[in-house]
Image (cartoon, rainbow, N blue to C red):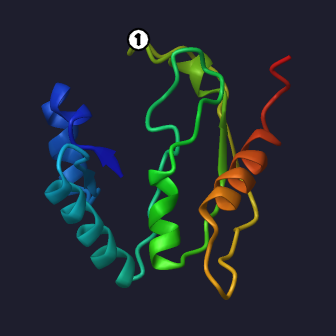
Amino acid sequence: MDDAQGTGQFPLVGTACQRAGHIMVDTHSAEGLKKTMADAEQKLSRGMSLVVFPEGRRTATGKMGTFKPGAFKLAVEFNLPVVPITIDGSFKVMPRSTFNVTPGRIVLTLHEPIPPSPEGHDIARLLSESRQAISSSLPDEG
C-alpha cells in the first residue's frame, strides 16, 4: 500500500504503482479512506497478499520507528494472518535523505505468520507481536 499523497512528489512512481495494482492510501478524507478499504477488500477477496510498512515510511535515522495501527487494521478487519518481515541494511544502502545507492547487503527475514484467533485479532497484541518479531532480527541498537 502506498500513501497517495507521497507519490505526488514523484508522478512516475505513482503511475507505476497504480499500474502494478498497488492500493493507494488516501487518509485525507473519510471518503478516501473508505475507498482505500473497499479497494483492499476487493483485492484480498481474490487472494492477493498485501505488503504494508507499519511505520508509514522509512525513518530519518534508519532505526525502527513507531508502528502505526492503520497497517494492522486491515488484518483485524478482514481477519487475516500477518507475516512480519524484517528488512535490515536498507538504510546503509540508501538513506531516506538521498537517492544515491551505496553497494551493500540487505537481509530480509520472513517470520512465522501471526494467525488470527477464532475471535479475531487484538490490534494491540498484533502490533506488539509484529514489532517484537521484526526487532528480533535486527542488530542491537545499543
Q: Quadrant of residue 89?
A: top right
The residue carrying mark 1 is 98
**Above or below for 97 versus 32:** above
**Above or below for 94 versus 70:** above
Q: Residue furthest bottom?
A: 118
* Front one among 116 and 139: 116
Which residue shows up at 20% across the image and 46% down it? 16
Residue 104 place in picture, x, y as percent: 64, 21
Which residue shows up at 51% across the image and 16% down it? 60
**Above or below for 93 versus 115:** above
Residue 10 place in picture, x, y as percent: 19, 28
Which residue shows up at 44% across the image and 63% down it? 50
Which quarter shows the C terminus? top right
Q: Secondary structure at mark 1?
A: loop
Identify residue type, mark 1: Thr
**Above or below for 82 versus 131:** below
Q: Quadrant of residue 12?
A: top left
* Front one among 62 and 107: 62
* Front one among 136 and 13: 136
Which residue shows up at 32% across the image and 68% down it? 40
